[in-house]
Image: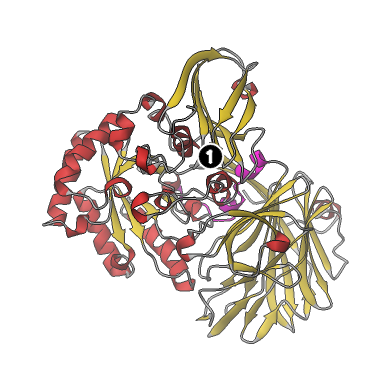
Amino acid sequence: MKVKPCVLGAVCAMLLGGTSFAQTNVRTVSSPDGHVKAEVFVTNGNLRYHVMRDGQEVLVSSRLGILSNGIEYGKQVELAVPTLHEVNEEYRLLGGHSTSINHAFEGEIPATSSGHNFWIDLHVANDGVAVRLRLPAEAGRRVEADRSSWNLAGNPVLWADPLSAAYEGQYRTTTLWSVGEDPIGLPITAKYKDLYVTISEAGLKDFGDLAIKRGANSELNGYLYADPKGWVTDEEVRQPWRVTIIAADLTQLVNSTLIQDLNPPPDAALANADWIKPGRSTWQWLSSGAPVIGEQDQWIRWTKELGFEYYLIDEGWERWDKPWESLRQIVSDAKKQNVKIWVWVHSKYVKDAVERNAYFQQLVAAGVVGVKIDFPQEFNREWSNWYYDTARDAAKFRLLVDFHGAVKPTGMERTWPNVLTREAVRGHEYQITRYHRRLDSAHDTILPFTRYVIGPADYTPTVLESRELQDNTWTHEFAQAIEFTSPFLCYGGNPRDLVSNPARDILTAIPSTWDETLVLPGSEPGKIAAMARRTGEQWFVAILNGENEGDLKIPLTFLGSSKWKASLLSDEQGSLDKFARKDTTLSSGDVLEVHANSRGGFVGWFRK
């Protein structure tokens, strides 16, 4: 719900943080709870902004701008009188919690740059700030460069990864002053004093993907790496939102939905569509490579035995003899066992709109419910539109979507909830012996506080085969399925190992979406990630540990009243492919004392 623009006067000035409209060079908007404040201002003719929380600077003077038709929209700027809107809404969310509350004040600031009109949009919520520029439609307008920046206060600790093809870089711990000047992919998370700050972008549509580089003064400057020559458009130019998520603790950070909030809601029919169903899936590629047609009955039986909703047939099915006929038969056989089928497809078959619709029609005719689309090309403006077009066409055919080899998420899953997940993460495909890959020990402990802050990711967790552990413990692998949010939760391990595991009952109880998420005391990105997550009247505790073994005390106060059945999995000393299991009864007054091995973890399952 949006209320009408503020009428100039005392109430409007209060919502705008007390700043008078009579000022010509500063525009201030505060969050509904009053803790966060953003100011857009002009200094020496240059458009800048800064962000504070409780009076503490988060971003010092940072740039805003777009270069278009040779005009620097961001220089020689004059600000006019803004209008203010309140946004206050709730919507269903598939992910770390079930409902998102989008409550913010938005300011629309008319401006001129060297006499040319444009607008500045400012969105200030309790969990952060977003800002963007809009340029009016103009025939043959050339968009040449983006001038956004984030100028973080001080020298914060950073958790960042280098810009890489398909956003599959490895996160590491560094600092702003030592991060170097190579391109960095978004998102990154910083810790400055007691605040956690994640920066990224939202609403990437009709615009090129943004990366950042550290400048000479440590300002993190955005640039359109995939659109070095820009593009021409006749339409209004809407810069994607430049987002700064701000949290007082890690629980607030992982529960932010600011990225999704900045995207339009879906049509009512899509928002309430009963065919959009999250779920768990088996998948053969990580454990055994291309699908063998004679083995499909076994994979379906395993999926049924685990109680999973889906089975994904990956790359290679299209090379079967009579692939479409075989696919239809497999889907029919799976349906009899209450298993639904997803299939892999190369993006080249669905790039063109006509070919895409024809391909989707074939999938629907075969009975397929979901499609994993792989290998999209570089993330320029043309391909940013392809994601939306593809999601729209898939929704028309009631197809669920998993984008792989994909650009980072920017919240489109709110507009198109049939897009359950995407990759854009260095996942379990980088912990695999046949390609001689092994993930750094800190990587898993950083991901929940960086990549997963901005949206679900298809990590393909939980591989239990002994030779594939590569120093991870079974409990670490179990904890991945709990902490790495993905409404299409595609397990990387061979289901043979999942079915036969002594903690199969715990594994099969793990859902693909959650009602509530808490980050537990002792968590520290790069060292340890500990979460409690609730589904209905069940709680799960998961710990992902990094390189150094250690101890953690976990108060169970989140359980509330009554006694709880508890099944606890701890690392077995001296063995990767075993765990110590304890089944007991616990209550909110109890404290778990956990010892986690190097690259180990812990899992607890609590039910009334």
Task: Give above or below for 223 relative to 568.
Answer: below
Say which residue appears at 27% left-offset and 51% top-offset: 289
Residue type (three-letter) at the residue carrying disc 1:
Gly
| Residue 466 among those drawn in magenta | no
Say which residue appears at 55% left-offset and 48% top-offset: 447
Pointer 1 residue: 96
Task: Give above or below for 67 relative to 257.
Answer: below
Q: Secondary structure at mark 1?
A: loop
Q: From the viewer's side, name the closer residue of 133 and 250.
A: 250
Q: To which quarter of the image does residue 183 belong?
A: bottom right
Q: To which quarter of the image does residue 166 belong?
A: bottom left
Q: From the viewer's side, name the closer residue of 165 and 404.
A: 165
Say which residue appears at 78% left-offset and 72% top-offset: 79
Task: Give above or below for 540 relative to 204.
Answer: above
Type of colouring: secondary structure
Position of 476 compared to 66: left or right?
left
Say which residue appears at 25% left-offset and 61% top-offset: 359
Residue 602 percent coordinates (x, y): 52, 30
Position of 281 compared to 29: left or right?
left
Q: Within 10 Å of the Cα at label 1, are there few (<14), some (14-19), or many (20+) other Cα atoms?
A: many
Count of numbered circles on the image: 1
| Residue 258 among those drawn in magenta | yes
Region rendered in magenta = 250-268
